Structure formats: structure tokens, C-alpha cells
Amino acid sequence: MSKYYIYTDGVVRGPFKLENIAMMLSDGRVDLSTPLSTGKGTPWQTIAERNEIIAARDQQLDEKNNAAVPEQKPRGRTIFYCPHCNQKYAGDASWLNKDIVCINCNGIFVAGNSSPEQEEISFRDEKSEEAFDWANCDGNVICPHCWQHFNSEQLIYIASHPSLMGDKVLGANAMKRFAPNKFNALGQALDEMGMVCTDVACPRCRLKIPLTVIDEKNFYFSLVGAPSSGKSYYLATLLNILRRSFANDFACTLLDVDPELNRVLDSYEETIFHASRRNEVAVLPKTQQTGDDFVNVVELDNIPVHLPKPFVYELKYLSSSEGREDCNIIFYDNAGEQFEPGADNISNPGTRHLACSDGIIFIFDPLNDALMRSKCNPDEPQLQTDEHVYEQAKLLSEMIARIRRHRNIGADAKCNIPLVIAAGKFDAWKDLLDLPLEKYEMLERLPGKLSALWCKNTVMDVSFAMREIMLEYVPELVNTAEGFFENVIFVPFSSFGCLASSSDSGQLGVVPEKVKPVWAEQPFFALLAENDLIDIAPTPGANESIEVKIIDNFILFDHPADGHQVRLPANYAGTVITINGKSYQMPQMVENNAKDFFNGEKKSDNDLWN
């Protein structure tokens, strides 16, 4: 239903329903020359230019003329009061039980025979807000803090005046949240002290939301990994690379829409890539489960709830000719301890962003795998302790259990969220893979096209080789991932491109001048391609043929080198893989129930989050 705003006495008022505007027109509170708009971004017109309002007014007048006059009310008049400000009305009897817009406070109420009441009632009734059924609320906006669905008209504003302190959810030190009913000529909300308010908040958790999250499409990306797997270092490196690569290669920019919200991640990047003493060891703090830098504590349903702080950036395309619209990229970095069994509960729902994620990067740490660490470079300082050695397949299983539970996925169904298993710290175990990742050309440029094309097939080729290694050392992790997710690829990378260093205090970090990341952006580019945010280069040709069988959406063939049977999932269909220097074309799936990776539907019809 349309909402209307009017401009009277130097103030924008609203929103109002169609019947409210028609009633105001019929009783003379507005006239045909009054400016009117239907919301942000729509032009101002006079009421005379809106035929639907004129028709609604005429209909109300006809109904009023035909209404029976109550016997107990001579001349068809009745007395009623605005319950918000006690404004007295002597109205026509036909107004009873209809919505009225108060001429004094602009509050909306239902007209009825009543007496004036002295009780102060706010524009949005707090009791009705508390009783709202959030569990069944559906809307086109997802809060990046609490992942509540709601509609944009449910947004609340954050007061600006310093005297308006205190919020029932965020505590006494937070600015007051409110539903506005007065606006200035620019359409900006005014708090009760008349100050302009530009910050909005989620109606559920009441935490601040960047305006771009409301106005643009959002893509949520989750980062998962065991303690000390290097998640924070990876995010800092990725952010630094994206700022340059987007501008230079993909004709878009990555904007920091809320420096306050992104402060922690921005500080990570500054510590490593903008250090003034580049020859000294830089150390990032460990991601914590608690603390103001990492979580917000809000009270929901009388329970203190710890919500992880998201990192929100706007992906802004420099040209509309590429056919893409600006959007938001939202990252989540959880402490590894939050994925331990039993850590997901009502007061600590910190990993529930997985349920609405558009892509997951699971960071696998070979240095903390019991078998693979024996094959790593012995000069790596992280090998001096086995404190963080962990069976990472268990963490993956816990992650899957949470996705299945919160996304309401059946026991026999697969998940269509794309998963990248990113094997980190490549510089310490690169001899196992023996591929010159630094020398691969990952972008292809076409004449007359602003944006480069990403070489998906190169990543899928490396993924095949990486998958073979992981099947040798951690087969349970590969089988667990491919047993639940439709689309899984394996990408090696290094955030540093060098071994870690020990600081004077004994903490492990990296010397900034030595940092030369290797393939750190490729796991994320894979997810961008899946969500159609970057273009993919054509698949190259193959010079060899191989006998394959397709059984139940799996590609089966004998490995050309040693003859062992290879069983590839459907997302490898159509790719060209390299074995012993020879390239082999994988067949396309003729009838593929699983969606092809990078080309499938993102949400199924029975998806709870669709």
C-alpha cells in the first residue's frame, strides 16, 4: 500500500495512508496545491496531480452524504479526542471507527466516542512493539547484526540531541531510538528536540544500520576457521587487495560506508599494510568472543545477547554499461571457539549469519593438521608448538549442523551455499602442491570492456590438484564438505607469502616489508563469481581426451598417472583440468539435479531464507 508525505508549514509530515490524505483534503487541512511525495527518491507533486487522492476524497464525501445520522446525535456531530495529545474533535458521525490524522500531533488514531485522557502515548506504542511476533516477520531487509527480516518502513531512527539518552535494549549509554513522525523540508527525520537525525537502526536489536544496507542489495560472506588459523590476517590482506584490484581490474570501488562499524578490520589492514616501521614484526590481536571491539551486547526478550560486529563495505560500479547495480559486501569474522559444540545458543547466536550467507570461506590450516604439519617447512615458527593442532573436520561438521538447523534443511538435502575450502599458509607447504601459483594469469581482458574477466577454470584446475592432496591427508574433511554442499572448491593461498616471524615479546606475526600475498583474493573471487558480481573468462580448450562415466551427478574416471579412481562432484562439469602437464576436458552434465557451480540458482523454492 502506498505511503504519502506532505509538505506544510516548512515541515515534511507523514507517512499517511491514501484515505488519511483524502480526509485531510475534504476537511480543509490540506488543499489541492499542497506538495506531496510517496517517499525518498520520488518527485514532489501537488495533490491536484494525484487522481487517486481526488477519487478517494470524492468517495468519502459520497459516503458521508449517504450516511444515516444517529438519533442520539443531532446534526450528525460527535465528540472524540486524539489519544496521543488529547486534541478535541467535533466531527461528523461518519468519521467514527475510521483512521484520523491528528491536526495537532499528526498521530494516527481510530475515531470513537471518548473522553480526554492525560496518559502520554508515544507515536509507536512500545507495548505493541514488544509483543511483535519477530519470529514470523518477513521482509526485504535483513539486519546485518541480528539477521532479523523486516520491511524498510519498520526502521527506527537514532536521536541526535545529546539529552535524548537511554534505550530499553541497548542500555542507558545509548542514544534513544524512535519512530519519527516529523521531517524537515529535505525529508530528514527530526527527533523530539527538533534535531535532524540521519542514522537508522534495526527495529529488533536497535543497532545502527548503514543506509546503503537499506537502499541496495546485500551479499553476506562468512569466514570460518579454527583458532589460530589466520582468519584475521586473511581478512586484512583480502581487504587491502580488494581496494586495489576492484579499481584497477573490475571497474568498481570498495567504499567504507561506516568507518565506525568497520574500525577493527580497517585497523587490521593499517597494522600490516600501512605500518610506519615496516621492518618490525606486526601482530594482530586474536578475535575475541566478547568485548566492545568484536561484539555488541543487546537485550532481546529479557536475555542479554552477544552479536558479532559485521564489516560492511559498498561495492560501487563505475559504469552502468556493465549491467550491474551497486551493492553491499558484508563480512563476518568469528572467533574459532564460537564453532565449538554447544557454543551456539540463545545468548550467543554469533554464527547464525551462516544461515543467510551468500558464500562461505572455510580456512583450513595445514600447520595445525596432525598429518600435514609433518610435511611443512620446519623453519615455520608456528610448528614449534602443537597447542592449536585440531581435527578441523569436526569444526566443519559443527558448522554444517548449524546451517542445517537454522536454514531448516532436511537430512537428505544438500545446501546450495557455495563453499570455498581455502588452505592457508601456502608458503609453509608449497612443496606438497608444487604449482607456480604466483605465475598464473588470473585475469583476461577484452577490447572495449571496462572490467576484466576472472579465470575460473584456472582456479578449478588448481582445485582438482588441491583436492587430491587433501584426500590423501584429510579425506574426512573433503567427504564431509562434498557430502553436504553442492558446490565446493579447494583453493590454496598465503596471506603473507613468507614465513611468520616472532616479535620481541614472543608473539607471532609478520614483517610488513616481507608481505607478498599469494592467491589471497582467489577464494573470495570465487564467491563473487557465484553471485554474478564479476565476469568469468571462457574455458580454454583441452589437448587430451579421457574416458569418463557419469553416475548420479558424479564424474568418474581413472587417474592418468597412477590409475586410482577419481570421483568428482558435478561442479567440475565442463572444466579443463591438468594432470602431468596434459589438459583433459570434463564433460558437461546433461541432466544435472545439482546446480553447476557459478551458474546455478542461489536459492531453492523451499529455502527458508529465500
Image: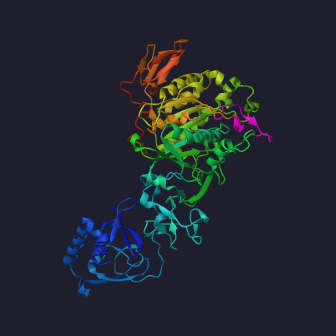
Provide residue 334's location: percent of width, then percent of height. Answer: 61, 44
Query: Residue 582: x and y, percent?
Result: 51, 14
Left or right: 394 with respect to 442?
right
Above or below residue 312? Residue 557 is above
Magenta part mainly helix, strand or loop?
Answer: loop
Relative to residue 602, is residue 560 depicted above or below?
above
Q: Residue at x 56, y 40 (%)?
A: 244
Residue 376 seen in the figure: yes
For the record, the magenta segment spans 495-513
Q: Quadrant of the C terminus?
A: top left
The image quadrant of residue 137 is bottom left
Asked whether residue 341 appears in the rendered view, the answer is no
Would you identify the image quadrant in which residue 388 lies? Answer: top right
Q: Extreme bottom residue here?
A: 74
Left or right, 513 with respect to 349, comes to right
Residue situated furthest front in the rendering: 448
Q: Nearer the viewer, residue 193 or 471?
A: 193
